[in-house]
Image (cartoon, helix red, strand yellow):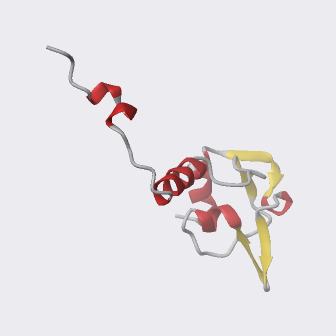
């Protein structure tokens, strides 16, 4: 699949009014360009600034990544999970 097609699929479409070159996630690296969000999603191919922008135009991070990051930080802090965090798992009284 083409690189930009992967981003269109991930973001849910195009932002046809803008080009990747206008997005602050499109960064020059040496003689080529990269998309910071594409790299964050795990991609490593070069980017073409003349492509039509995806719907993540000027988004600072991939959506959903913040929740994953917060959960990882919570686990690293040593906070113990409690059964009371999940009331649907507590057996009903007899």
Identity of the residue furthest to the left in this view: 94
Split into 4 quadrants, where in the image is the C terminus?
Answer: top left
Number of numbered labels in the structure image: 0
Left or right, 77 with respect to 29, comes to left
Taking depth in this image into account, of 25 and 53 the one nearest to the observer is 25
At 63% from the left edge and 53% from the top edge, which residue is drawn? Answer: 62
Coordinates of residue 81 in the picture (x, y in percent): 38, 44
Which residue is pictured at 56% across the width and 58% down the height?
Answer: 6
Q: Nearer the viewer, residue 23 or 90?
A: 90
Q: Is residue 88 left or right of residue 36?
A: left
Query: Residue 61: where, in percent of width, then height?
Result: 68, 54
Pinpoint residue 69: horizontal percent, then vertical percent. 56, 55
Residue 86 occupies quadrant: top left
Q: Position of residue 76 (x, y in %)?
A: 48, 60
Identify whether 56 is placed above or below 28: above
Q: Check the image and name the residue furthest to the top.
A: 94
Q: At x 70% / y 46%, what residue is drawn?
A: 55
Q: Is residue 16 above or below residue 40?
A: above
Q: Is residue 44 above or below residue 73?
A: below
Q: Residue furthest bottom?
A: 30
Residue appearing at x 79%, y 71% in the figure: 27
């Amino acid at each position: 699949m083409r690189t930009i097609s992967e981003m269109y699929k991930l973001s849910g479409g195009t932002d046809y009014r803008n080009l990747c070159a206008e997005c602050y996630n499109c960064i020059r690296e040496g003689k080529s360009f990269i998309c910071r969000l594409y790299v964050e999603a795990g991609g490593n191919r070069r980017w073409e600034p003349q492509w039509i922008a995806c719907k993540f135009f000027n988004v600072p991070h991939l959506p959903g990544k913040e929740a994953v990051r917060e959960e990882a930080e919570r686990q690293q802090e040593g906070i113990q999970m409690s059964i009371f965090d999940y009331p649907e798992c507590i057996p009903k009284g007899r």
